[in-house]
Image: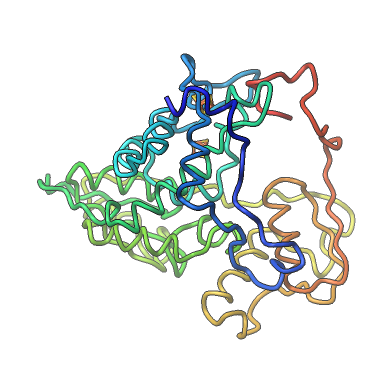
Amino acid sequence: MGKATGFMEYEREESAAIKPKERIKNFDEFHTPLSLEKQRTQAARCMDCGVPFCQAGMMIKGMASGCPLNNLIPEWNDLLYNGNWQQAYNRLHKTSNFPEFTSRVCPALCEKACTCGLNGEAVCTKENEKAIIEKAYEEGWAAPKPPKVRTDKRIAVVGSGPSGLAVADQLNRRGHLVTVYERSDRVGGLLRYGIPNMKLEKHVIDRKIEVMKAEGVTFITDANIGENVKAKKLLEEYDSVVLACGASNPRDIKAPGRDANGIYFAVDFLKSTTKSLLDSGLTDGKYISAKGKNVIVIGGGDTGNDCVGTSIRHGCKSIMQLEMMPKPPVDRLPNNPWPQWPK
Ligand code: SF4
Ligand code: SF4
């Protein structure tokens, strides 16, 4: 385990966030990581629970609780505490293809289910994960490792979002020849264009794509299957085809005035900003701008919040966010106990 008495000795400490008035001046990530030593201290708080709810990834009362990837959290927390970073990376990579993405954008189900959170503060598992994967890149442990044997089976993966990339990574490791088709101009799907840059800087995706390319995965962009690439061609040229097209169809609402000007779907709004940011640093003017506008965002989930953060960075005049659910409580209610996902 981490340190037997660590959870009693050390307080939870998180990375520092740049102040809101500063962070809205750009689309950069805004957390400054703890020092490696401090991160190890945070790992020391892990109790190596007999039943590690953090990694359970199970459904409780219809809601996911614990890490859906079943990451071996107590193991790599212990390795991190003991300074065995490389082995911590090996254990992390065993269950997760992309810790560099999850450690930035996952809602940290592990922490909501952490036993330390029952009577105190949960272990900083998400930031421990980020420290491990960033150290792995720094040290070269996350460098390309092409498969030693090829099966010569050819597989097409349609879609380069997180599921398409994970499928491609797994199949390539098994020695199959994988080609990923992406309809957009850049690889990544919603990672690229759905999640704004301040939550996931896009060079993090590029870094992993370069590793995957060096390991033998081929990526073809601007390839919309059924439009400019025939589905028949894939069936003829590949032994198998995996559909990982995602769920990018927006949910519309039928309300009077829906056809008015100035109403956009979130993904179109967010994509236009990120594309312009990547193409030109937002100088090409080819994005839906909220500058000087009074903005209403309908939806209080992650995507709605991304639209709020993006509108504020554009320089909107005012912003209001509408959510159909009641305001969530500050603390858990008695009918929503640990280790359930807090409503
Ligand atoms: S932050 Fe990492 S360990 Fe925690 S639930 Fe997400 S993927 Fe799993
Ligand atoms: S539940 Fe928390 S304290 Fe227990 S093993 Fe998981 S991270 Fe460590």
- Quick check: 101 above or below 326? below
Give the x, y percent position of residue 241: 31, 46
Q: Nearer the viewer, residue 1 or 163?
A: 1
Relative to 118, 278 lies left or right? left
Of all residues, the one furthest to the left in this rendering is: 149
Give the x, y percent position of residue 147: 16, 48
- Quick check: 317 above or below 207? below
Q: Nearer the viewer, residue 271 or 120?
A: 120
Please give the name of the residue rendered at 70% of the width and 65% of the height, measured from the top-left corner.
310
Q: Quadrant of residue 272?
A: bottom right
- Quick check: 43 above or below 116? below
Relative to 307, 276 lies left or right? left
In the picture, which quadrant includes the N terminus? top left
- Residue 327 visible from this viewpoint: yes
Give the x, y percent position of residue 129: 46, 43
Q: Quadrant of residue 181?
A: bottom left
Q: Quadrant of residue 187?
A: bottom left
